[in-house]
């Protein structure tokens, strides 16, 4: 265990050594460590999951880091192309990038943490040359099979050198919900700067911790996410590298994402729109001490009610299943005290997860086609960020009443 975890003792953005504890979820299994047998799943290791805040720049980050090889080994099965809303989002994102930066036919677009190539495919269909980098072998293999050139590696100086050797420097570098994952965040930002042409653009989306705090979507905290970003610490760090901060915005992807647009200029300016966003952020819950202190208690209360709803159904003999086995399901189940007594099994659209078992609880994951063979009374949507997509698939599927329970952002129930 000691060799698998290291304490984070200096801020991953500014290097400051005064990290203050914020929230501690205790020992939690790795959410992507899905096992081939129930026995192995129940025996899965757990690791500390806690968040600290830097007293110098304000950046939130894990207090302990699990070694990347454990996080992204063969059991890492997340695929970005599974969710229809995500595919649509990437198409709109490519249009936005073209309008903002002029990236288009013939431009070189590089995606850091490109997964199965869904984002790059949106640029490729618009005439851009593309290259992805991703350490997960399953996702990178699918991308390459689909004609999206992908280097199966961590994004380091060697990967940058390989891209430049193959294609030259990039016109546009992008990344989506990945830059909370990387082990050496500062090095990745330096490598992106080196990869870009002068005046090239870098845009990325990451989970916005302001929205996590505001909505209570705590289950986006997990071991793969080392960082919990907001705009001010990122602005401080990236402008010091010589990026201009051009634009900041928020969207609803993954429960609330922050989008940054930067340009390699060597000046490190913050442009007017971005400055306005930073001023607004300083008035948010991120700087409300009373709100921050009470955040964990509100989570405990909501998860207690979630448990009571399912426990009452289970006690009455209802057949309860769940839809979706995202990484976030592991912490969600722990905080709600759920296991096989409350949830019979989980169905998944990702065929690479079907046939496996959730860590610690040992709850089985079945393909979504298993819904054809059961008559559930209650379906819990663990993949709550895709709730609308999932509910659309379920409407009209059953010839009996089914209650849907969506745990987050607001705990809600609805009838199919």
Image (spheres, rainbow, N blue to C red):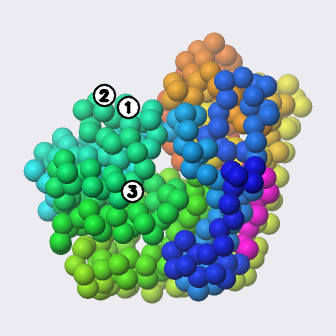
Q: Quadrant of the C terminus?
A: top right
**Up-down: is 51 above or below 161?**
below
Residue named by callout 2: 145
Mark 2 → mark 1, Cα distance in angstroms: 6 Å
Q: Position of residue 78 (x, y in %)?
A: 50, 39
Are the residues at dot 2 and dot 3 in contact (C-beta closer than 8 Å)?
A: no
Q: Is residue 260 visible?
A: no
Verify whether residue 25 appears in magenta: yes
Mark 1 → mark 3, Cα distance in angstroms: 19 Å
Task: Name the foreground residue: 381 vs 115.
Answer: 115
What is the number of callouts on the image?
A: 3
**Up-down: is 20 above or below 222?**
below
**Which region is colored magenta?**
21-28
Question: Picture quarter containing residue 330?
Answer: top right
Q: Is residue 91 left or right of residue 309?
A: left
Verify whether residue 326 appears in magenta: no
Residue named by callout 3: 156
């Amino acid at each position: 265990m000691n060799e698998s975890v290291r304490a984070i003792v200096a801020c991953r953005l500014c290097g400051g050594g005064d990290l203050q504890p914020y929230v501690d979820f205790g020992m939690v299994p790795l959410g992507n460590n899905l096992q081939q047998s129930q026995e192995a799943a129940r025996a899965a290791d757990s690791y500390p999951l806690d968040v600290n805040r830097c007293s110098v720049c304000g950046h939130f980050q894990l207090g302990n880091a699990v070694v990347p090889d454990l996080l992204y080994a063969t059991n890492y099965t997340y695929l970005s192309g599974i969710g229809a809303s995500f595919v649509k989002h990437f198409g709109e994102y490519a249009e936005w990038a073209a309008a903002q930066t002029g990236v288009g036919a013939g431009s070189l677009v590089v995606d850091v943490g490109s997964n199965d190539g869904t984002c790059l495919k949106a640029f490729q269909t618009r005439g851009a040359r593309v290259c992805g980098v991703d350490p997960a072998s399953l996702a990178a293999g699918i991308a390459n099979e689909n004609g999206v050139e992908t280097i199966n590696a961590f994004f380091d100086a060697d990967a940058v050198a390989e891209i430049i050797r193959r294609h030259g420097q990039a016109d546009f570098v992008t990344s989506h919900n990945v830059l909370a994952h990387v082990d050496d965040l500062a090095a990745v930002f330096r490598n992106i700067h080196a990869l870009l042409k002068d005046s090239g653009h870098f845009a990325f989306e990451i989970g916005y911790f302001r929205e996590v705090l505001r909505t209570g979507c705590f289950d986006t905290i997990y071991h793969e996410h080392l960082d919990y970003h907001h705009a001010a610490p990122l602005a401080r760090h990236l402008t010091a590298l010589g990026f201009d901060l051009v634009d900041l915005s928020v969207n609803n992807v993954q429960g609330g994402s922050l989008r940054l647009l930067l340009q390699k200029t060597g000046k490190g300016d913050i442009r007017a729109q971005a400055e306005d966003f930073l001023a607004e952020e300083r008035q948010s819950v991120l700087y409300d001490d009373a709100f921050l202190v009470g955040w964990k208690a509100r989570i405990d209360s909501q998860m207690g009610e979630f448990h009571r709803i399912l426990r009452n159904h289970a006690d009455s003999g209802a057949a309860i299943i769940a839809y979706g086995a995202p990484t976030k399901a592991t912490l969600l189940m722990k905080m709600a005290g759920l296991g096989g007594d409350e949830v019979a099994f989980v169905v998944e659209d990702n065929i690479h997860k079907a046939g496996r078992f959730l860590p610690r609880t040992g709850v089985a994951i079945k393909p979504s086609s298993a819904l054809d063979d059961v008559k559930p009374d209650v379906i819990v949507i663990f993949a709550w960020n895709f709730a609308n997509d999932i509910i659309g698939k379920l409407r009209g599927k059953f010839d009996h009443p089914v209650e849907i329970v969506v745990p987050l952002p607001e705990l809600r129930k609805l009838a199919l």
